[in-house]
Amino acid sequence: MSKSSKTNNPLKEKIHEIIFEAETPMGKAFDVALLYFIFGSILVVMLESIDAIGSRYANLFFYLEWIFTIFFTAEYFLRIYCVHSPKKYMTSFFGIIDLMAILPTYLSLFVAGTQYLVAIRALRILRVFRILKLASFLKESNVIVSALKASRTKITVFTIFVMIMVTILGSVMYVVEGPYDSGFDSIPRSIYWAIVTLTTVGYGDISPISALGQFIAAIVMILGYSVIAVPTGIVSAEIANANAIANDIGSTRSCQNCGEEGHAANADFCKFCGSEL
């Protein structure tokens, strides 16, 4: 027996339709307005960070930022209000991003400068995919997310191996280059060099002087290509697998009970939790 996601509160259902749905005219209008607010708030933060502009329009930027923050705060609590499982929304990816988008402004009342962290609102632009009904983009993003989840164990094991390797290499370079004035004055600093070299970043702030040290550095540089190739190969293989089993993304209709999207346009029940749509 499927439990119904319908409520006896028409107001909740209407708010849910406007905020979470991109298929209706009002829902799309709300999401487009949300995008304008996101772009506007990010622009204000960027302009405020420029001394010549920030000092001249400080009051204007202050009021604009609070207007944006109040809007996003109201939107956040409305999302919590209209869903059946507020906890699930609050702990979801977008729920966490929505919360982090409003916290910096409030934190700035106690810690100066934290208001610039509102640039994290840029992550909310990901909603543009569902607003413009770019189903193919949604499908491909789901494939990437699935591939990353599937490969996380392999990548974790490989990362641990790399951490062990740079620790050993850093310790060896500390012993080899220690007598020389080449910057390898501690094991942590030598490990930093090993990480920079192994990842092929190569800042050049530290470099070996001795012949043996340069020989080891050459080996580390060659190993660096493997560091790039291995995780790339792991994720690529998982993306191929995810593509093979990917299903159609469906519409942007959102279940009021579990919050999941991707249902068929004519679906009556959620394919994830079985609740009535």
Image: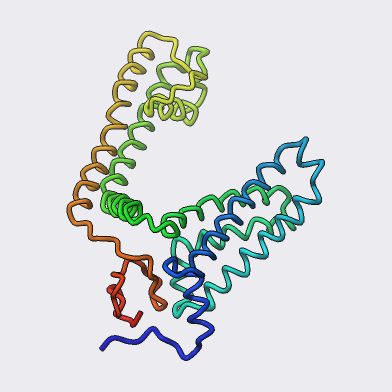
Residue 226 as seen in the image, left or right of residue 172: left
Q: Position of residue 205 (x, y in %)?
A: 52, 19
Snapshot quadrant of residue 271: bottom left
Along the line of sight, which residue is nearer the eye, 223 or 29? 29
Residue at image x 38%, y 65%?
252
Q: Position of residue 129 (x, y in %)?
A: 42, 55
Residue at image x 80%, y 45%?
57
Residue at image x 40%, y 17%?
176
Along the line of sight, which residue is nearer the eye, 274 or 220? 274
Along the line of sight, which residue is nearer the eye, 221 or 120? 120
Quadrant in the picture for the N terminus: bottom left
Q: Position of residue 155 (x, y in %)?
A: 30, 44
Residue that sits furthest to the top in the current view: 211
Residue 81 as seen in the image, left or right of residue 254: right
Q: Position of residue 214 (x, y in %)?
A: 37, 12
Residue that sits furthest to the bottom in the current view: 8
Whether 151 is drawn above or below 2: the answer is above
Residue that sits furthest to the front in the current view: 25
Residue 251 as seen in the image, left or right of residue 205: left
